[in-house]
Amino acid sequence: MLAILRQIAQEIDLAGDLTSALEVVTRCVRVAMQVHLCQIYLIDHKRQHYMLMAFDSNDILPEPSEWVALNEGLLGLVAEKMAPIAHLNLTAPHESNKLAFLGVPIVYHRQVLGVIAVEEVNHRIFSEDEEAFLVTLAAQLAGTVVHARDMGFILRAEATSLKASCLQGIPAVPGVAIGEAKIIYPLADLDAIPDRIITDIAAEINRFNAALHSARLDIVQLQQRVEPTLPKEEQVLFSAYLQVLNNAELHMGICEEIEKGQWAEGALRRVIKKHVLQFSGMTDPYLKERAEDILALGQRVLYHLQEKTGKPLHYPQKTILIGEKLTAADLADVPLGLLCGVVSYSGAGNSHVAILARALNVPTIMGAAGLAIVELEDKPVVVDGYHGCLYSNPSAKLLRKYTLWMQEEKELDKELQALRHLPSETSDGREVSLLLNAGLESDATLASTLAASGVGLFRTEISFMNKSQFPTETEQRNLYHTILRAFAPRPVTMRTLDIGGDKALPYLPMQEDNPFLGWRGIRFTLDHPDIFLMQLRAMLSASDGLNNLQIMLPMITSVEEVDEALQLLRRAYADVQEQGLKIAMPKVGVMLEVPAAIYQIADLAKRVDFFSVGSNDLAQYLLAVDRNNARVGDRFDALHPAVLRVLRDAVEKAHACHKPISLCGEIASDAVAAVLLLGLGFDQLSMNAGILLRIKWIIRTISYKQAQELVERILLLDDAVLIRTEVEKMLDGAGLGGLTRAGKK
Ligand code: PEP
Ligand code: MG
């Protein structure tokens, strides 16, 4: 069965579209299980019934009905029970010949998408093995169906019905935005290409021919470039590539698809996938390998098709950026001032795209799959970042409601400006400094506009990420100096390079099975003293004459790492002193983001001056939930009782060693969590610019005693949802409810 499952999985993967994929499945299943009928139904929510998507029968049985009501018969039972149902009709079948039935639900994220069922006229009891086979297949199929739905390959009727309804995702950046959807498709990824209907067929064929021509030129140029060095026999490869690109059948197939009204990208996807499937099914190993070439060449043509259309040339005044897999670069591409909202179908609240969106103060929803992305193109949409809801084609009533809330939010922000120069102090005299999380050169401008007590986290890796090679020492020094000078005399905490995990450098590919448990942060820099020393020297020399630099080490797991880092810091310090610079040795701190570090605070405290909790990673490692994975995004909750108890331990331990402790993870920007952080006794909170005054409002409204009492009560609760509700109640009572939902009140 494993071989059959593998073969089916491969064929699903290569099928040009979902209908072909489902047809492949029904055919393979019918043959493999030796049944008379295999059928796949998917739920059409609009019409409240199952729609027959594919079937394969040996004609003994009548064709299955095109649709079946949701709660009808055995199909309804499978969906209702969310479990396989085997049924054997022992009495003589009066309506049809059906004797044996086995149905298995296609489930994704606890939701039934449809049912795969087999029927057999002969007396038959399906074995456990056969049931397990169908269950496995259904699980494989679920991902394909969801991807196809998100890409707009299927259930257009359903997608249309959802147009005016809410698509639920993970609330990542609070706030509300009304704007126009701009879809970003990943470049040169055939799988990400949706179907799209066009009317100007001649123009589309011209577009395709131009892209094909550019792809041919690429190959010819490559061929010429390698000609002097590559042996003759290897050069044949390029001729083979050109043969594929000149293949008349391929060309005709794509043009035929376009003539049916399909856009060039969709036509290319359909035909290339069909050819790949054909070739990969061949037994001759040479021909089998050609499948890879066809795919690669198809992607090259796609790249040229997308050169002009892949990235929007035009962004609307109020751009809501939507993509299956948005990257930080996609956000950065939008011209300043036009980006109003972000919706990513993958990723979660603590993905770095979400962090960047938060830094830009743009309402954001992550992991929002469930609506055909192509259906949203250029449509008016509303993003509710408080609840993680995306509304497409909103009604006039909904628009009025959200417009009012947006006005109220603007008013609130205006009113809060009055707090700018007031101390961040509770009514009973507890001061909690509010610092800025930054990472861009342009953040220097916030020094004068924002009343932050300094920078609590400067993510240096951001400037490494948008380059094509490691920045030079001088480039680094200049950037750090700009930030240090802008904020002086206020302290600026520069974090040493923290790459790895989901922060990859384009010029340093790292292939790891578990990147979040791998070569990250300090682990990388200690293994690269050359890069580390360069950065440390750049930081130190940048502080010349300013002396407001603090250095923070990420991903610390053990004291040896700190000892080694300090040794390198002393070396860098000696280097800059040799250059004649008179710089005070900066304070050094450690990020508490690996749980092990919390329980070594006393040992670490002998070596460093301060601590800062990186709650994004700390929660990720404590809860064993990938911060970047939308599938488990709802399980990532920094208000989980265990996280709060560990935070309490961290504060107690740091204070017992007389060391200050701050928190610079995203929860410092969450109004509900911020109350608890105040009550837990953090000395400083570091957050995004857009939220700082709101958090100051909380601190100036709630007394330290009140926050401490709340924490005492909260620490007895065993459930994150209860904790959030309890704190929200308290914020409401204090007149701060507007911080947790859209609007002012
Ligand atoms: C954290 O982990 O909380 C943190 C601030 O670091 P980053 O999000 O950059 O990993
Ligand atoms: Mg971190």
Image (tube, rainbow, N blue to C red):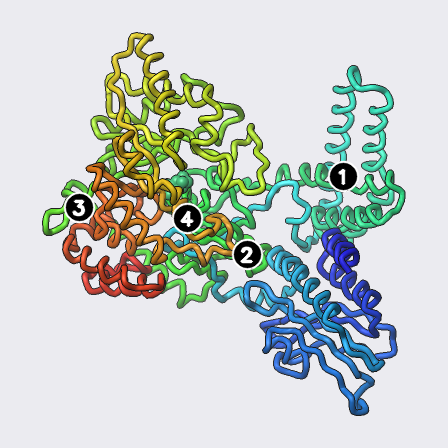
Image-quadrant location for residue 451: top left
Amino acid residing under circle 1: Asn
C-alpha span from label 1 to label 4: 37 Å
> Residue 466 placed where, x, y %?
48, 31
Location of mark 2 (residue): 376
Classify the position of ligand 1 by quadrant: top left, top right, bottom left or bottom right.
top left
Location of mark 3 (residue): 419
Image-quadrant location for residue 447: top left
Amino acid residing under circle 4: Cys
C-alpha span from label 4 to label 3: 25 Å
Location of mark 1 (residue): 209
If you read the primary sequence from the N terminus, does the residue marked by circle 1 or circle 3 appear first? 1
C-alpha span from label 1 to label 3: 61 Å
Location of mark 4 (residue): 340
Q: Can residue 691 be seen in this view?
A: yes
Q: Can residue 434 be seen in this view?
A: no
Dots 3, 2 in contact, CB < 8 A = no
Is 111 in front, or is 49?
A: 111
